[in-house]
Image (spheres, rainbow, N blue to C red):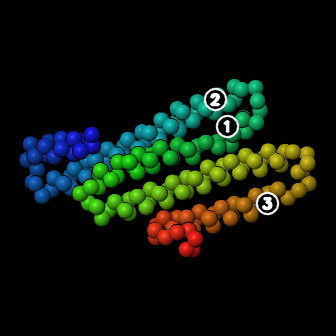
Amino acid sequence: MLQQIKNLIDNLLVDWGVALNIIIYLRVLILLVVMVLIAYIAFWITKKIIITYIYKLFRRTPMKWDDIFADHKTFDSVAHIVPAMIVKVVAPVLFSDFSKFLPFVLKITNSYLVIVGLMLVLSFLKVIEFGLSKSDSFKEKPINSYFQVIRIILYLATGILILSVILTKSPLYF
């Protein structure tokens, strides 16, 4: 499908009289702009429509614990996964003529997914921390300190994962 789109763009550019040595660059630029637009639209749809609907659904249920997810906007970071996956799928075809750029794009995309995963885990931790701080059995305990230590460990682990993605080394290497 994407190969047919590439051929269509090439044919259009040739018909418009674009020099043959420039066509490949213009095609990549056009497809890159289209990919960014599609990724942004997918992000917007996911965030503004799907996740907003999920939050409204949570608030309508008789259970109160799911309202905490909506109040803390726990699933907002999920919207970032959709455009990253679009880039991850489209990039190999988009950069097929520029194979030296593909590993860089994929490393950046994978690093972004690691960061989004961290954001999602931190959102869940915030909800758990909030729930435990409201509990009578944890009122006198330094819950915030414990969760701060967990967050620091997660930041360090995320940094190691990002380094391992960028440098293509095992996380155990670090």
Q: Quadrant of residue 140?
A: bottom right
Observer-nearest residue: 95 or 127?
Answer: 95
Q: Amino acid at mark 3?
A: Tyr
Cβ–Cβ under 8 Å for marks 1 and 3 = no
Q: Amino acid at mark 1?
A: Ala
Residue 163 appears in view: no
Q: Residues within 10 Å of mark 3 (few under 14, many from 20)?
A: few
Q: Which residue is mark 3?
A: 146
- Quadrant of the image for the N terminus? top left
Image coordinates of residue 174 in percent, x first then y, are 57, 74
Of callouts 1 and 2, which one flags the residue occurring earlier in the amino acid sequence? 2
Is residue 158 left or right of 66 when viewed as pictured?
left
Of callouts 2 and 3, which one flags the residue occurring earlier in the amino acid sequence? 2
> Which mark, by number, is residue 70?
1
Of callouts 1 and 3, which one flags the residue occurring earlier in the amino acid sequence? 1
Image coordinates of residue 78 in percent, x first then y, are 56, 44
Observer-nearest residue: 61 or 161?
Answer: 161
> Which mark, by number, is residue 164?
none
Label 1 SS = helix
Q: Which residue is mark 2?
A: 56
Vertical position of residue 144 compared to residue 63: above or below: below
Q: CA distance from mark 2 to mark 3?
A: 31 Å
Image coordinates of residue 86 in percent, x first then y, are 41, 45
Label 3 SS = helix
Q: CA distance from mark 1 to mark 3?
A: 24 Å
Q: CA distance from mark 1 to mark 2?
A: 8 Å
Cβ–Cβ under 8 Å for marks 1 and 2 = yes
